[in-house]
Image (tube, rainbow, N blue to C red):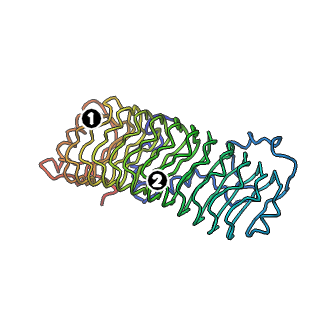
Amino acid sequence: MDSKPGSEFPTTKTRSVILRLGVSIAAVFAFTRCFSFGSGPSGGGCGYQHQDDFNEEICGDNIVDDSLTVTNQEELAQLSGITFIDGSLVIENSSLTNLDDLDDLICVRGTLSITDNAELTSVGGLENLEQVGRGVLIENNDSLITLDGFYNLYLVDEIIIEENDALESLQGLSGLTSLSELLIRSNNELETLEGLAGLNSVESRLEIRGNGALVSLAGLEELSIMPAGDLSISDNPELTALAGLENLEEVQRLFITDNESFASFDGLDSLMTVTYNFWVHRNESLTSLDGLSSLDSIGTLSLWDNPTLNSLAGLSENLELGAWDLERNLSLASLEGFEALVPETGFTAYRNLLVPTCDLVAYRDALQSDGWEGEVCISENLEDECDDDESDCWWAN
C-alpha cells in the first residue's frame, strides 16, 4: 500500500462512504483486531508479536501440560507449587479474595484470564509470574483495587483491563516495556495510568475508553512511537488534556472522541506523524487546535461535532495533509489557520453554521487556480452571496 498522506482513503468520496455509514472506532479496529481471548486453549489463532521471545528455560519443571479453569479455592489450591502452565489459565466466577496459591507460578504459555471474581481485592500471589505467552485479561472484578502482584511480569503480548469498578491503580505493571495491544476500559475509579512507566512501545493498539475518573495519562511518558499502531482516547469524561504523551512522536491512527471535558492538546508536543486518520469528534470543551504545531504529516484530519471549537489555529503552515473534514462545529466562524493548507486529495466543509461560504469558496478557488484537482464538498455553512458557488456533497441529500 502506498504510504503517502491520505493514501489509505484516497478520495473525499471514499472517506465519506465510511463515515456516513456510521462506522464506529470499534468497528474500524475490528478490521485489524486479532481476537485472542477465548478462541482456543492457548488463545487465538493469529500471530503474536512476542511469542518467539517466550523462554521455557526459566519456567521451572513443575508443569501442567494443559489449560485450566479455576472457579473456587479448592481448585486454586491444587495449583500450589506449579511453576509452568503449558496452556491457558482462567480464573472466573469465584469467591476468591486472593491468588496466594499461585505464588510459585512463573510462566503461562497461553492466556491468563481473571474475570468475574466479585471478592478478589488483589492479584497478590502472582509476584513470581514473569511470562504470559499471549494475553492477560482482567475483567469485571468488582473489588479489585490494585495490580501490584504483577510487578515481575515482563513478557506478555496483549493486556485488557476492563470493568473493574474499584481499580485505583495500575501499579505493578512497571516491568512491561513492549506490548502488541493494551486496552484500558471502563474502570471507574482509575484516575491516572501511573504504573506503566516502563512502557515504550505498543505495536498494534492502545485504547483508553470509558474510565469515568481518569484525569491524566500520566504513566505513558516513555511511549514514543506507534508507527503501526492505533491510539484511541474516548469517553473519558474527566480528561482535560493529554499530559503523559509528551514523548509520542508517531502513530498510525489517532482517535480523540467523546471526552466531554477535553479542552487542550497539551501533551502532544512531540507528535510529528499521524499516518492515516486523525479524528477529533464530539469533544464538548475543545476550543482550538493549540498544541499540534509539531505535526508535519497527517493522512486525514477530521473535526466533527466539537460545539465550542472556535479556532483552527495551531497547525503548522508546512503540514503535509492528505485531506481535511470539518463538520458541524457550531462555534467555528472562520477558516483562519487552514488557509495555507493544501490537502492532497480533497476537503469537506459541511454545516459549520458560522463559517462564511464565501471564505470556503475563496479557499477552493485559490487551490484550483494553482492546478489543484482534489475533491470538494462545501455545503450548508453560513449563508451568504456565495451560496450558488457551493460544491455539492453527493451524500448530503
Question: Is 385 or 354 nearer to us in this picture?
Answer: 354
Is residue 209 toward the left or the right of residue 91 in the image? Answer: left
Q: Position of residue 97 (x, y in %)?
A: 67, 65
Given the image, on which type of amino acid does mark 2 rest? Answer: Glu
Q: Position of residue 146 (x, y in %)?
A: 59, 55
Q: Is residue 363 above or below residue 165?
A: above
How many marks do you count on the picture? 2
In the rendered image, the quadrant that contains the C terminus is bottom left
- What residue does disc 1 label? 368
Q: Position of residue 325 (x, y in %)?
A: 34, 47
Whether residue 1 appears in this view of the structure is no
Question: Is 80 or 69 nearer to us in this picture?
Answer: 80
Is residue 1 toward the left or the right of residue 341 in the image? Answer: right
Q: Are marks 2 and 1 in contact (CB under 8 Å)?
A: no
Instruction: Give the residue at x 20% y 39%.
Output: 362
Given the image, on which type of amino acid does mark 1 rest? Answer: Gln
- Crowding around mark 1 (Cα neighbors within 10 Å: few <14, some 14 to 19, many 20+) is few
Give the numbered dot on residue 349.
Answer: none
Instruction: Give the residue at x 73% y 58%.
Output: 100
- What residue does disc 2 label? 191
Distance Cα–Cα, label 2 vs label 1: 49 Å
